[in-house]
């Protein structure tokens, strides 16, 4: 029995996962696990990994894990600690240095720009969502501001976290966008140093940090066919990739 699990750690930003999740859910029974960070709790990736282990402790079969951003970082950390429990790992917008995320990008911008928090978040919102309508910026700023509070992070204005680089034992798919200001080419190409023959990087040419929100069908196609190679009996969508050829770059 196949088991597929989306790992989330950003309640205020999960709206931007819905289109991709809807597409994937038409092919597999995709479960959703979410970490909630309250104001009275310590914030750490390690604590989130422990909670994910509690959730999967009684799972009878290895799970195909997938996550974006901080959720992907949690999935990565779990896969390294419990490799026997993970059938495959799919990471969206996760750098080879897992501590690089939009939070670290925010604190770097806050330190370098002579503006207050809201102005910096407005600038970052435009960068993370390059194709969003300007009248949505205020909503994005509110969501990003909440995510800085709700999502587990070891970053702060005083110190940026650094995590261990490395690969994983199970098959790995990395998805990202060419125009993402957070996960740059150098932050992405470093994965090749840890790749196995089955591992793969796929990049959309547009979409920013949340590229899967703007190109859900194309991203779903790549993920589904990655899973199908591992689970040959899995029946996936037939998608006319010719329609999206200009929006993808494959780096094997």
Image (cartoon, rainbow, N blue to C red):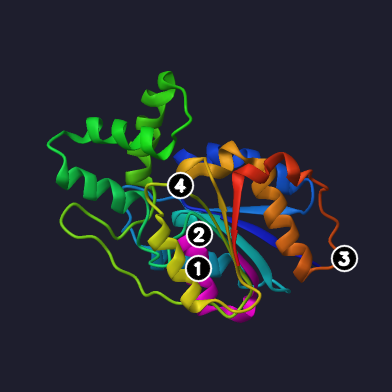
Badges 4 and 3: C-beta atoms under 8 Å apart?
no
The residue singled out by tag 3 in the image is 233
In three-dimensional space, the C-alpha distance between marks 4 and 3, rounded to whole angstroms, equals: 33 Å
In three-dimensional space, the C-alpha distance between marks 2 and 4, rounded to whole angstroms, equals: 11 Å
Task: Tell me which label, 3 or 2, sits earlier in the chain.
Answer: 2
Q: Residues within 10 Å of mark 1 (few under 14, many from 20)?
A: many
Q: Position of residue 209 (x, y in %)?
A: 46, 45
83 within the magenta span: yes
162 within the magenta span: no
Question: Quarter holding the N terminus?
Answer: bottom right
Task: Tell me which label, 1 or 3, sits earlier in the chain.
Answer: 1
10 and 211: which one is in front? 211
Instruction: Indicate whether 44 appears above or below 77.
Output: above
> In the image, which is nearer the foreground, mark 2 or mark 4?
2
The residue singled out by tag 1 in the image is 76
The residue singled out by tag 2 in the image is 72
Q: Position of residue 228 (x, y in %)?
A: 78, 63
Q: Quadrant of residue 45?
A: bottom left
Q: Residues within 10 Å of mark 4 (few under 14, many from 20)?
A: many
Q: Residue at x 15, y 45 (%)?
A: 112
Q: Residues within 10 Å of mark 3 (few under 14, many from 20)?
A: few
């Amino acid at each position: 029995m196949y088991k597929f699990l989306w790992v989330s750690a950003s309640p205020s930003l999960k709206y931007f996962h819905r289109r991709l999740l809807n597409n994937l859910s038409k092919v597999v029974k995709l479960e959703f696990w979410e970490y909630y960070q309250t104001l009275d709790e310590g914030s750490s990736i390690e604590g989130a990994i422990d909670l994910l282990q509690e959730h999967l402790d009684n799972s009878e079969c290895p799970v195909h894990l997938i996550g974006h951003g901080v959720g992907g970082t949690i999935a990565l950390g779990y896969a390294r600690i419990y490799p026997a429990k993970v059938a495959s790992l799919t990471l969206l917008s996760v750098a080879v240095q897992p501590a690089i995320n939009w939070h670290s990008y925010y604190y770097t911008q806050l330190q370098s720009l002579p503006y207050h928090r809201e102005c910096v978040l407005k600038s970052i919102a435009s960068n993370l969502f390059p194709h969003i309508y300007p009248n949505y910026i205020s909503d994005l700023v509110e969501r990003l501001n909440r995510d800085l509070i709700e999502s587990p992070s070891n970053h702060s204005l005083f110190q940026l976290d650094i995590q261990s680089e490395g690969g994983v034992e199970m098959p790995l798919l990395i998805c990202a966008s060419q125009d993402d200001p957070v996960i740059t080419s150098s932050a992405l190409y470093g994965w090749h140093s840890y790749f196995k023959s089955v591992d793969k990087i796929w990049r959309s040419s547009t979409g920013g940090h949340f590229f899967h929100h703007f190109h859900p069908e194309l991203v779903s196609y790549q993920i589904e066919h990655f899973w199908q190679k591992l689970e040959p009996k899995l029946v996936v969508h037939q998608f006319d990739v010719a329609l999206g050829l200009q929006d993808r770059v494959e780096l094997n």
